[in-house]
C-alpha cells in the first residue's frame, strides 16, 4: 500500500513537472517568436519577406545590413545613443545617489513621493515645455538637451532603486566613520557606496537601457547631428513604401546590444533588485 502511494505521488509529480515544462516552453516560444521572425526577415530580400506562405528555408543575404551600415550610416546613430545613454546615466547617478541616500537616511517621504509622481507622469507632458525652453536657449539638436531629457526617465528610477539599499546599511557604520574623523561626504563615498555596489550596477544598467530605447524626446529634440537609433529607423519608412528588410536589419542592430547587455548582467540585475527588496 505504501509503495503504491509513493508510486502515485511520483507519477503526479512527473505530470506536474511536465505540465510546468510545457507551459514554460509555450511562454518562451510566444515571447521569442517575434524576435526570431525579425532576425529571419533581416536576412531576406523584400520579395521573400512579403511572400506567402513565408519561407523558413532560404538563401540569406547581407544586403540589408550593408544598407544599414553603408547608405544609412548607422554607426553614427549608435555612437549618438551611446553618448546620450552614458551621459544621462552618469549624471543621473551623480544626482540620484545623494538624493536616495538623503531620503533613506532622513526619512524624507514627501520628497520620495514627489520623485515617484515625476516618474509616473507621462513623459509627453514635459515635451512641449522642454522644447520651448531648449529652443529659446538654442539647444535643439544638442547632446545636452537629450541627456537632460533622458534623465527624466532614468533619475527617478535610480532614486527608487537605491533607497532600499541605503536603508539597509546600518547607521553605525557611517557614524563610526564620522567619529574616526571622516566628513559626512567622505563616509558616504568610502563606506555607503561600496556596500551598495549591486544596486548601483542595477540602476546604471536599467537607466542606460531606458535611454537607449527612448524615442519620444529624441524624435522632437534631435536632428541629423544627434539622431539616435530608435529615431533612425524612420529612415526606412517613406511615403511610398517601407523597406522591410532594412527595417528588420536595423531593429536587429538596435536590439542586439541591449540583449547582450541583459544576458551578461542578468545575474547582477536580479541580485541587485532582490537584495534591495529583501533588505529594505
Image (cartoon, rainbow, N blue to C red):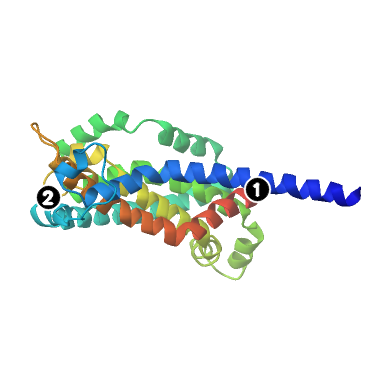
Q: Within 10 Å of the Cα at label 2, are there few (<14), some (14-19), or many (20+) other Cα atoms?
A: few
Q: Nearer the viewer, residue 248 or 153?
A: 248
Residue at the spot 18% in from the left edge and 52% down from the top edge: 77
Q: Closer to the observer: label 2 or label 1?
A: 1
Residue 45 horizontal/vertical position (percent): 16, 48
Q: Nearer the viewer, residue 125 or 43?
A: 43
Taking 114 as reference, is 107 left or right? right
Q: Is residue 40 above or below residue 75?
A: above
Q: Specify the quadrant of the image occupied by residue 263.
A: bottom left
User: Which residue, given by chain and number where applicable, does mark 2 sit on?
Assistant: 225
Would you place residue 51 above or below residue 45 in this image? Answer: above
* Relative side of 22 to 258, left or right: right
Residue 232 in view: no
Residue 59 percent across, percent down from the top left: 20, 55
- How far apart in space, not on screen, are marks 2 and 1 (Cα)? 54 Å
Quarter of image, res 139: top left
Can residue 102 be seen from the camera position used here?
yes
Q: Residue at x 10, y 57 (%)?
A: 70
Secondary structure found at label 1:
helix
Percent across and percent down for residue 260 are: 37, 59
Mark 2 or mark 1: whose residue is earlier in sequence: 1
Identify the secondary structure beneath mark 2.
loop
In the shown orientation, is residue 218 left or right of residue 112?
A: left
Q: Residue at x 76, y 50 (%)?
A: 10
Task: Tell me the tag on residue 51.
Answer: none
Q: Which residue is mark 1?
A: 17
Observer-nearest of 276 and 133: 276
In this view, the residue farthest toward the right is 1
Residue at horizontal 52%, vertical 65%?
A: 194
The reply to whether dot 2 and dot 1 touch (C-beta < 8 Å) is: no
Q: Percent position (x, y) of residue 248?
A: 23, 46
Amino acid at each position: 500500500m505504501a509503495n503504491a502511494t509513493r508510486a502515485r505521488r511520483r507519477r503526479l509529480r512527473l505530470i506536474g513537472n511536465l505540465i510546468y515544462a510545457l507551459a514554460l516552453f509555450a511562454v518562451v516560444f510566444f515571447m521569442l517568436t517575434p524576435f526570431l521572425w525579425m532576425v529571419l526577415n533581416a536576412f531576406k530580400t523584400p520579395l521573400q519577406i512579403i511572400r506567402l506562405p513565408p519561407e523558413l528555408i532560404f538563401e540569406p543575404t547581407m544586403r540589408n545590413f550593408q544598407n544599414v551600415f553603408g547608405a544609412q550610416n548607422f554607426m553614427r546613430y549608435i555612437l549618438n545613443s551611446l553618448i546620450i545613454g552614458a551621459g544621462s546615466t552618469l549624471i543621473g547617478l551623480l544626482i540620484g545617489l545623494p538624493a536616495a541616500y538623503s531620503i533613506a537616511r532622513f526619512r524624507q517621504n514627501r520628497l520620495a513621493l514627489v520623485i515617484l509622481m515625476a516618474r509616473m507622469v507621462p513623459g509627453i507632458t514635459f515635451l512641449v515645455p522642454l522644447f520651448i525652453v531648449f529652443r529659446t536657449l538654442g539647444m535643439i539638436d544638442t547632446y545636452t538637451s537629450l541627456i537632460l531629457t533622458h534623465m527624466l526617465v532614468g533619475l527617478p528610477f535610480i532614486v527608487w532603486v537605491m533607497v532600499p539599499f541605503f536603508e539597509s546599511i546600518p547607521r553605525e557604520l557611517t557614524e563610526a566613520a564620522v567619529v574616526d574623523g571622516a566628513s559626512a561626504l567622505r563616509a558616504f563615498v568610502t563606506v555607503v557606496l561600496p556596500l551598495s555596489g549591486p544596486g548601483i550596477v542595477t540602476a546604471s544598467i536599467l537607466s542606460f537601457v531606458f535611454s537607449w530605447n527612448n524615442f519620444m524626446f529624441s524624435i522632437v529634440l534631435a536632428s541629423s547631428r544627434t539622431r539616435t537609433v530608435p529615431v533612425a529607423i524612420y529612415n526606412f519608412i517613406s511615403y511610398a513604401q517601407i523597406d522591410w528588410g532594412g527595417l528588420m536589419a536595423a531593429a536587429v542592430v538596435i536590439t542586439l546590444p541591449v540583449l547582450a547587455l541583459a544576458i551578461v548582467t542578468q545575474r547582477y540585475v536580479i541580485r541587485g533588485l532582490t537584495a534591495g527588496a529583501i533588505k529594505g
